[in-house]
Every structure is written in C-alpha cells, then in structure tokens.
Image (spheres, rainbow, N blue to C red):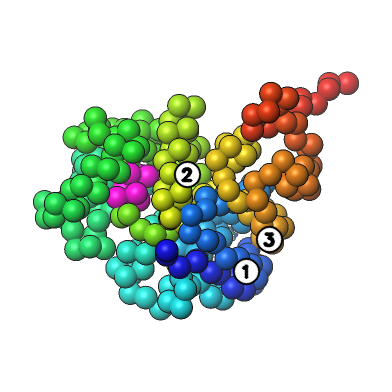
Amino acid sequence: MADDLIIEALRVEAQGTPLIADISVRFAPGQLTAIVGPNGAGKSTLLRAMAGVVPAQGTIRMGAADLTALRPAERARRLAYLPQVHELAWDISVADMVALGRFAYGAAPGRLSAEDKAAIDRAMAATGCTDLAHRGVTSLSGGEAALACLARVLAAETPVLLVDEPVAALDPANQYRVLECLAALAADGRTVVAVLHDLSLVAQFADTVLWIGGGQLAALTPATHDAFAQHVPALFTREPVFASDGSSALYFRRSQST
Ligand SMILES: Nc1ncnc2c1ncn2[C@@H]1O[C@H](COP(=O)(O)OP(=O)(O)OP(=O)(O)O)[C@@H](O)[C@H]1O
C-alpha cells in the first residue's frame, strides 16, 4: 500500500495576506477526496501548493519523504497535477502531448519504451482520446483539450493525482467517464484529490470531502448526506435538497421571485 499524503500547517500568502491558512490534512490511498468550497475559497491554491507549483510554508510529505525536498523528476513519479487552466501553445499532436506525461521516466515523444507506450494508450483510452491521437492540440475543442490534458496527467501513473476541476468543460457523459475513471484509480489504491463544483457528482463519486472557505479548512468528512446538510449551507448559504429517489442527486431550490 502506498504512503499517505500528509500536509501539515500548509500556508500560502500573497503580499502578506494568507490565501491558505495553516491547513493540516492526511489523504489516504484508496480514497477519492473532493475539495469543495465557493469561488475564491482557496481550492486551486491549496492544490497548487500541494503540487509544489506555488511557494508555501509547512510540510508536504508522503510517508517519511518530504516532497518539497525531492528533485522534480522524483516528485513527478509520485505526484501528478492537472491545473485548472490548460495552456496549449505548441501545436504538437495529442499523442505527443500525452507522452510528455512520461518525462519523469526519461521518456520523450519519439523515445518511448513499451511501458511508456502502454501507459499512454491506457490514459488515452480512459479519457476517450484515442481517436484524437493525431490531432494538433491547438485545434481541439475546450472539452477535447481538457480530456487530452487529463490523459497526459494519467499517463504518469503516479500514486497521487491532484486534479483541479477536471470535468468543468465536459459534457455530462464525459463528466461521468472521468469521475468513473478517477474513482476506479482510487479504488485501485491511488490517492486522488479533485476540486469539484458539482455537488451531485461529489455525492456520487467522492469518498471524502475537504470543505474549504476563506482559505481555511472547514472540515474533512465522509461524503454523506449529513455532511452535505451541515457544510453546504455554511459555505454556500443555500440549503441543499436531496432527490427523493434515494440517488445521490443534490440540488438547490430556485429562489421565489417577489
Ligand atoms: N497570486 C495571488 N495574489 C493575490 N491573490 C491571489 C493570488 N492567487 C490567488 N489569489 C486569491 O486567492 C483566493 C483563492 O484563489 P483560488 O484560485 O485558490 O480559489 P478557488 O477556490 O480555486 O476559486 P474558484 O472556484 O473560483 O476557481 C482568491 O480570492 C484569489 O483571488
């Protein structure tokens, strides 16, 4: 079993203002954790700090290994990160971009081992990108680009996956495809942490929810109805309504006009 991902007293500041205020959490392998909170709550900043792409105070470790002290290639073999915004400036093929996910293993497009090729094929199949393999990335639609970027992250086959709004640009079927894929990776023993806004998808797929508001950890809970009933009104100032059919569907009632 892989080690827990542990963050202790994680703090991110901008011009002296805390964006993330001393958050300590332990993420267990085998769990899909959703980070949930309002716009501007600090979800992306927390994920970016955990990925080591913004300066942060505190500790980020896997078991005894301090992730911040590892060389980039070593860290990239343990942890893969999907940013919220994808910038696709080079017009390389989708297959070559996904191959970049294997750089930490010494791979490069045109220099791929059988293991690299198999991981790339798995990632493209899991995200439904196989038919896009020879397309230039700058010609992709927003949803296609999001799937291709996720494939690049999955191709790294790391024990930890940090993904920021992986389904925001996707149609409903692809949202399910991606969440089923992330849940399956978690069930397979990976540590998966995803920023998600759709509470029904969170209720359906997440094992654990990290509730965050104003840069502060509100709670880390199982994804139960009780937890939604407690934390959704506190963070979003609206009462969630659960579908009466026993499903995980969860919505807000439309305000009455006066
Ligand atoms: N470099 C920065 N300098 C100043 N403020 C910043 C900086 N980066 C982020 N912020 C602010 O920190 C807060 C948290 O931003 P963050 O992107 O983490 O929010 P979020 O929870 O991911 O929001 P969203 O749901 O809108 O994507 C926001 O108010 C944002 O404006």
Q: What residue does disc 3 label?
A: 217
First of labels 1, 2 by sequence position: 1
Inspect the image, locate mark 1, and give the three-letter code of the amino acid beneath it: Ser
Counting from the top left corner in percent of width and height, residue 193 is at: 51, 53
Residue range corresponding to the magenta coloring: 149-155
Name which residue lies at 27% across and 43% down: 122
First of labels 2, 3 by sequence position: 2
Asked whether the beta carbons under mark 2 and mark 3 sit within 8 Å of each other, the answer is: no
Instruction: Specify the quadrant that holds the N terminus.
Output: bottom left
The kind of secondary structure element at disc 1 is strand
Q: Is residue 90 left or right of residue 28?
A: left
Counting from the top left corner in percent of width and height, residue 30 is at: 48, 54
Front-most of 160 and 69? Answer: 160
Name which residue lies at 66% across and 57% down: 220
Does the magenta segment cover residue 66? no
Query: Is label 3 within 8 A of ligand 1 (CB to nearest ligand atom)?
Result: no
